[in-house]
Image: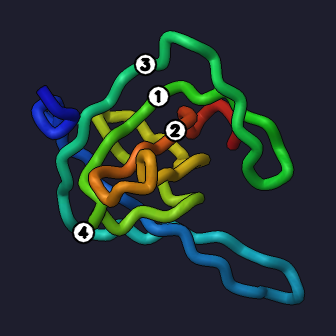
Amino acid sequence: MSIQDYMQTDFTISTRSETKVGGRNVMSYTPEGNTYRCAIFTPSISKTVRFGKQDFIISKNLYCNLGTPIKLGDIIIIGGGNYDVISLLDTNNIGHHLALGLIERESWV
C-alpha cells in the first residue's frame, strides 16, 4: 500500500500574499478555487518546527500529490478546520508526494 491509497480527504487552499501598506507588510489570503485530495493524520510524536521566527508543534501531517500548488504560509481548509502550512517537504526528495506540517489556525492568530 502507498500513501496515495490513503488520499481520500478533500481540501482547498487559500494562498497567502503580502503587500506593503504605509511601509508595513499586510498579509491577505485568496481562495485558490480547486479541490485537492490528501491523506491527513494526527502525529503520534510531537515535532517542533520553526516558522516566521516562532516555534510551533505540528498538529496534523498532510500528504498530497507533488503538483499541488501549496507554499509555506498558505492556509489549508479541511473538514471545517483551517490550518497554516508551516513545513513543506518533497518526501525523501524523490518527486513522489508532498508532506506538510500543519497547525490549527486558531492556535496562533
Disc number for residue 42: 3
Identify the residue at horizontal 37%, vertical 51% (top origin): 98
Identify the residue at horizontal 54%, vertical 33% (top origin): 104
User: Label 4, on which residue?
Assistant: 33
User: Label 2, on which residue?
Assistant: 102
Q: CA distance from mark 2 to mark 4?
A: 20 Å
Task: Inspect the image, locate mark 4, and give the three-letter code of the amino acid beneath it.
Answer: Gly
| In this view, the mark in front (2 or 4) | 2
Q: CA distance from mark 2 to mark 3?
A: 10 Å
Mark 1–mark 3 CB contact (< 8 Å)? yes
Q: In this rendering, would 56 be left or right of 34?
A: right
- At numbered mark 3, what does the secondary structure look like: helix, strand or loop? loop
Identify the residue at horizontal 32%, vertical 69% (top origin): 32
N-term-proximal mark, 1 vs 3: 3
Q: CA distance from mark 4 to mark 1?
A: 22 Å
Callout count = 4
- At numbered mark 1, what does the secondary structure look like: helix, strand or loop? strand
